[in-house]
Image (tube, grey):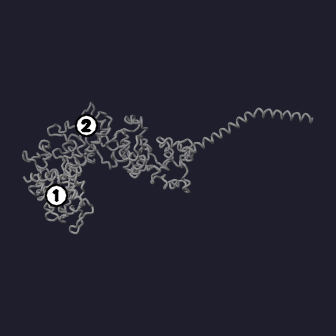
Amino acid sequence: MKKFLLLLLLGSTVFAQSKDDQVCLDCHNDKTLTTNRNGKEVSLFVNGKSFAGSVHEEISCTGCHSDVDPSNLPHEEKLQKVSCATCHEQPVAHYERSLHGQAFKKGKSLAPTCATCHGKHDILSSKNTRARTYVMNIPSLCGQCHKDGTPVSGLSTVSERKVLNEYSESIHGEGLFKRGLIVTAVCTSCHTSHDILPHENQFSSINRNNIVKTCLQCHRQIETVHQKVINGKLWENQPHKVPVCIECHAPHKVRRVFYNDSYPDDLCMKCHSNQDLYKVVDGKKVSLFVNITEFKGSAHTVNNCVKCHTNVSQAKNPICKTSGKVDCSICHQSQVEDYNISIHGQKHYGGDTKAPYCTDCHSKHNVQEKKAVNSPTFARNVPELCGRCHREGKNIGLAIDEHNNGIVTSYRESIHGKGLLQSGLMVTATCVDCHSSHRELPFKDSRSTVNKNNIAATCAQCHLGIYEKFKESVHSPTVTKTDKKLPTCNDCHFSHEIGRVDQQDFRQGIIQQCGKCHNEVAETYFDTFHGKVTKLGSSGAAKCYDCHGSHEILPSTNPKSTLSRNKIIQTCQKCHPNSNRKFVGYLTHATHHDKERYPYLFYTFWAMVTLLTGTFIFFGIHTILWFPRAMKERKRLREKIKESEETHE
């Protein structure tokens, strides 16, 4: 009845609401409006837009601040505290008996109130993704107090301070943060939203007698799906009575739990220590021998056999009969998901016998950590590991090398390969750094790490500084919006043949690389002094990137550009120490072939060509016409000389 009267009252005041609210906002919309409380300056600013978009938008200011009369202003400086119980009676009752409410009553300054979690004038529905109380935001909301480094953490035990870290790494946290599963458990799922009580309290949702009921909110049919035998005995001590969940599953460290005592390794090794043990698969003998010494020295030494070979049963003879393939995703879920997406996984599950599986790279019972020097996945050994299939002459290598001339050989001769194999630099890039360890995809796939849209970010894993410069350059798709292809790292540096940029081969070849897109400009370059010297084989002459920059290429109008008015002298001084403002006025790419951009050069060139050509033509014709007369005159002179000689005789 009380709620009905309240709703009726609210309904009758809707008409006057906007008018009353505007009266309040006339003052409270001022960001400089403040008051002094206990020696502290407190803002009285109310953002009208935020309030209009909140869940309380249909409630006027006086709906909560009932002791204010809009017709009698200014109101009292000190108003009564807003009572949320007017509308939210049960949540407030739960809060008041909770740990938070009791701490607030005792005057604890760190105790949260309704406004701490929900806000004041910008309260949003818990279904709104921007709300503090939206399920995805709950851990960070609670973590404002319940994590290391907060004032509250200083009053907590070590285990309590690590609650948020432990939750984020638990199966619930992974479900929420990594998979976006909003049906997974968050803080309020177990502790409730308002009735948060210590586990000793009999009414607490995490009390020993209530925890099973709390877990069953999500895990409804746990008796049906749960493993019946744990540690060699039935998991239920009493029929149809679920044991306290947290005895096996730590509250904030929930993990998949494995039970090994029922199937000790000794039981497995009674058969699998026999080197002659085998099974027939597709007409071929497959050894079932397990070298226990190798296994004990592997990365899985802490695991029992049944942690991997889970599909065993006492009802079978032997217990591992028809146990099937090991499911690596039990522990390595994200890696297996990546593998399933990869070209390797797709081909493997498509029936391609050449496609690698987990055991082809990591082995079976002798799995080594990637930090172990003798591990196939150790950085120095990765090229050799990938080369098993991708080396020239191998079946897969032949197919790949139709378009890539010797991938492994090229890598060995590249700056990355030499750094790894000759200089021993373990931080240099290997196959997995570019192609990923498990999610290898063709470069045409938009999800691939070597796709044209992703390759810059892939290279940034090591070359972050260069990537940050590249993102601001004209070659970056975020800066230049065009349908034309923009260059990426491998367009200039190639994929597997990456060489040193200070070597002659790279400097000579860069003109061709730039010329693929800037063909006209590249042609004009060879008309210049720099270009002509380069044609003669000089690697010291200025190339494209000496003037324009390598990765930070910007328009000359940009003050940061190496060719901007403020920096061009400095750029030229790298080669020409005496450069000045007149010197840099030289038109670098000017050419008489470009009528539109350089008309004076164009017309001057052709005027001189015409003049020279006309001169040569004129005098050529003159010479040709004069030739018969010259011959006649020569003959006449000879005759005259002859006559003179005869007379003197």
In the depicted structure, whether residue 363 falls above or below residue 97: above
* Residues at circles 1 and 2 in contact by the CB criterion of under 8 Å: no
User: Which quadrant of the figure has residue 111?
Assistant: bottom left
Circle 2: residue type: Asp
Where in the figure is residue 342, as x and y percent of width and height?
A: 31, 39
**The disc label shown at residue 276, or none:** 2
Residue in front for this viewpoint, 9 or 132: 9
Residue 222's label in the rendered image is none
Tell me the distance, in whole angstroms, between the alpha carbons under discs 1 and 2. Answer: 87 Å
The residue positioned farthest toward the front in the image shown = 71
Q: Position of residue 67 (x, y in %)?
A: 14, 61
559 with respect to 173 (left or right): right
Q: Which of the two labelled residues, at mark 1 and mark 2, occupies the earlier sequence position?
A: 1
Examine the rendered structure and indicate whether residue 31 appears above or below residue 463.
Answer: below
Q: Residue furthest right?
A: 649
Is residue 230 visible in the rendered image? The answer is yes
Graded by Cα atoms within 10 Å as few (under 14), some (14 to 19) or many (20 or more), the crowding at tag 2 reads: few
Judge depth for marks 1 and 2 and give the one in front: 1
Question: Which amino acid does the dot numbered 1 rest on?
Answer: Thr
- Horizontal and vertical percent position of residue 119: 21, 56
Q: Which residue is mark 1?
A: 62
x, y (%) of residue 139?
21, 53
SS state under label 2: loop
Looking at the image, can residue 163 be seen?
no
- For the residue labelled by badge 1, is the local secondary structure a helix, a strand or a loop? helix
